Amino acid sequence: MTVKKLNFKTSFILLLLTCFSLHLTAQSDNQNNNDNDNQKQNTQLDKDEDFERRWKKTPTRYHNWGIHFGGGDWDNDWDDDFRVGLIDIGFSTYFHNGSLNLPTELDDFDQNYGGSLNLNLHAFRQRLPIIKDNLGFEYGLTIAWKQYRFSNDFQILEDTIPFTIQDDGTTYKKNKLKTTFLEVPLMLTLSPTNGRNPFYLSAGVYGGVLLGAKQKLKDDNGNKIKIKDDFNLNKFRYGVIGRIGFGPFAVYAQMSMTELFKDGQGPELTPFNVGISILDF
């Protein structure tokens, strides 16, 4: 077979066509890459604008404190709203027959409110929507420290029924009864405008079990005494709880429906706590 030789003109035209074809291919690839980059940038801008819009639209979810784990869509602020490390701090006191004024026979239990503290560490709390974001169900697990500081000088005797105190003549700079409870709150939370308004109102009940108790004393010489006992305290406690919040700030109140001490084994005192939420929903 005879192969026809290509002359210079034909070879040059073929070379030009090949180069032009390669140029078009490269230009097309560059255009596609640029289009992809622009699309990615536009998508990121859309996401940033969407995030900013959502941020402004939902202050209760993104502007508050606490460690937050949220799943679900952006528009549902309470969808799987799970948080840990929330903290309340306030005062611990008690009523006798519905009054803070104790009768004469209970003068020994007059409180020094400056040292009667309540600290609640919420190991976790979760809020689930019932009616969109207007109404939600909230539950959790709380370690609650309740401290009662007494104004008078006495020691609580261990393993005595009924509850017994004695004054050995020592003057104490500090005289505290400290209790630790593990509590479970069950609450309904109302927000007027689908969770987008920072105001909310919560109310419900709680139950708790006593983990430990001790009396801490410190005399004028700096000597310290610790007495660990159950002191005839009620080991199980339940009551009502309420909370009013606005943004990251909230006020809470907790009223026990059981006495501080077991029936007939101690003075008739009903625990009550009130304070603010340092880290809240």
Image (cartoon, helix red, strand yellow):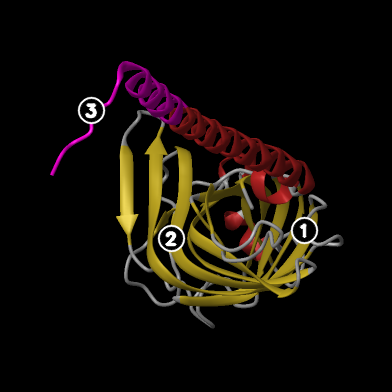
Q: What's the CA distance linking mark 2 and mark 3?
A: 102 Å
Q: Are marks 2 and 3 in contact (CB under 8 Å)?
A: no
- Which quadrant of the structure image shows residue 267? bottom right
The single residue placed furthest to the bottom in the displayed view is: 263
| Mark number displayed over residue 195 | 1
Q: Secondary structure at mark 3?
A: loop
* On screen, residue 127 above or below 2: below
Could you tell me what secondary structure mostly forms the magenta stretch? helix
- Identify the amino acid type marked 2: Thr
**Camera-nearest residue between 171 and 246:** 246
Can residue 118 be seen here?
Answer: no
Tell me where the magenta segment starts and ends, as one range: 1-23
Which residue is painted at 31% across and 34% down in the image?
A: 223
Q: What's the CA distance linking mark 1 and mark 2?
A: 33 Å
Q: Secondary structure at mark 2?
A: strand
| Mark number displayed over residue 180 | 2
Q: Say which label, 2 or 3, has the lower sequence index.
A: 3
Picture coordinates of residue 210, whole percent (x, y): 42, 70
Which residue is painted at 72% across and 47% down in the image?
A: 54
The single residue placed furthest to the right in the displayed view is: 192
Asked whether residue 10 is drawn in magenta, I would say yes
Asked whether residue 14 is drawn in magenta, I would say yes
* On screen, residue 26 above or below 251: above
Q: What's the CA distance linking mark 1 and mark 3?
A: 83 Å
Q: Secondary structure at mark 1?
A: loop
Give left or right: position of 257 versus 134. Answer: left
Q: Give the crowd class for mark 1: few <14, some 14-19, many >=20 residues within 10 Å.
A: many
Picture coordinates of residue 194, whole percent (x, y): 81, 62
Q: Say which label, 1 or 2, has the lower sequence index.
A: 2
- Which quadrant of the structure image shows residue 225? top left
Q: Are marks 1 and 3 in contact (CB under 8 Å)?
A: no
The residue pinned by badge 3 equals 5
